Image (cartoon, rainbow, N blue to C red):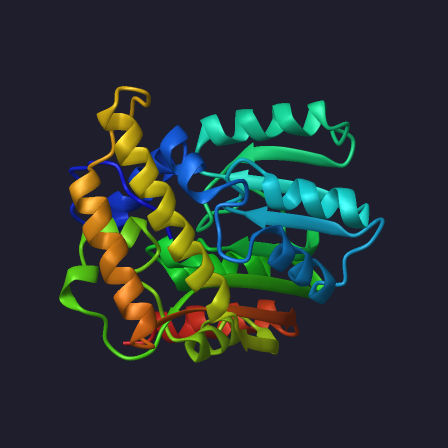
Amino acid sequence: MTVTARTDASAPADAKACCAMAYESEAVRWLLGESFHPGGLELTGRLGHLLDLGPGRRLLDVACGQGASILHLAEQWGCQAVGVDLSARNIEAAQAVAVARGLGSLVRFEVGDAERLPFEAASFDAVLCECALCLFPDKAAAADEMARVLAPGGRVGVSDVVRSGELPGGLSGIESYIACIADARPLEAWAALFGGAGIQAEVVERRDAALVQLADEVRRRLFSAEVLVGLGKLNWPEVDFRTANRLAAEVVAAIRAGRLGYGVFTGRAVQAAEARRQRAVANESP
């Protein structure tokens, strides 16, 4: 989840570009911390374990942001890794950090769209996607692409905001979409989504406490930021504090009501090519 800057976007497809710009901002980094997602690098490490990473394994991080997760995994597991993100600014920043940390030989970054990944089929042994699936307008296309670039037997690991039942109307706008809320799906729906791409579910688990912790931290940091802006010690002209505070309060209320949580999904590629062929045939049928 995040706090959004002012935007004129009015549809999920438009929000993809808005998300890329929002997650470039200093304000978002300040509010969300290094890893930009609930559970931080501890939960990233859990996913690394489930993905069976190790030296020689090829990892792709989809919507990698500024690279905190993939750099952590490459350093911890010694895997060869590629990060892809829609934001050229994020990619530039991530590459600079990789070089500064001496990880340039293990990790590289490229600009790319999750729904049209710029890689050959079977290029990776594992694919990671943290707190970004909610942001993809065509989730089936993104799942297909993750399956396509996986080698046979490779694994996908996803963590994201999940919902239970309907969300309040206040969490359906563009700000909530960019905040990974408006298009959240039930955790069980992920198995169906990736199953359609030939990915067989292995681990499906709730991590709601991670979302609670991040939501509380964001509210504290948001309050501090508003005070500092008022005192002239922080310059965030792009942040609409009124909208941000309303959104944060509604998110916390939805979490407490059990309507929002956080989940982890991992699956193994078993028949990706055949699943995509069958889907294409079904789409062509009258």
Query: Horizontally, is 228 left or right of 11 in the view?
Result: right
With respect to residue 224, does 259 lie above or below?
below
Q: Residue at x 44, y 55 (%)?
A: 214
Q: Residue at x 69, y 44 (%)?
A: 72
Residue 157: image location, x then y, percent: 60, 63
With respect to residue 223, does 253 lie above or below?
below
Q: Quadrant of the C terminus?
A: bottom left
Quick one: 209 or 64, which is closer to the camera? 209
Q: Residue at x 54, y 55 (%)?
A: 129
With respect to residue 39, does 266 lie above or below?
below
With respect to residue 109, does 141 lie above or below?
below
Quick one: 13 or 238, which is closer to the camera? 238
Q: Residue at x 27, y 45 (%)?
A: 15
The answer to whether residue 154 is seen in the rendering is yes
Question: Please, which residue is most extreme toward the right here?
Answer: 55
Exactly how many numbered labels are in the figure?
Answer: 0
The answer to whether residue 182 is seen in the rendering is no
Query: Horizontally, is 198 left or right of 236 in the view?
Result: right
Quick one: 285 or 246, which is closer to the camera? 246
Residue 226: image location, x then y, percent: 26, 35
Residue 234: image location, x then y, percent: 32, 23
Quick one: 90 or 122, which is closer to the camera? 90
Query: Horizontally, is 36 left or right of 103 in the view?
Result: left
Residue 221: image location, x then y, percent: 38, 42
Q: Quadrant of residue 168?
A: bottom left
Query: Horizontally, is 150 left or right of 252 in the view?
Result: right
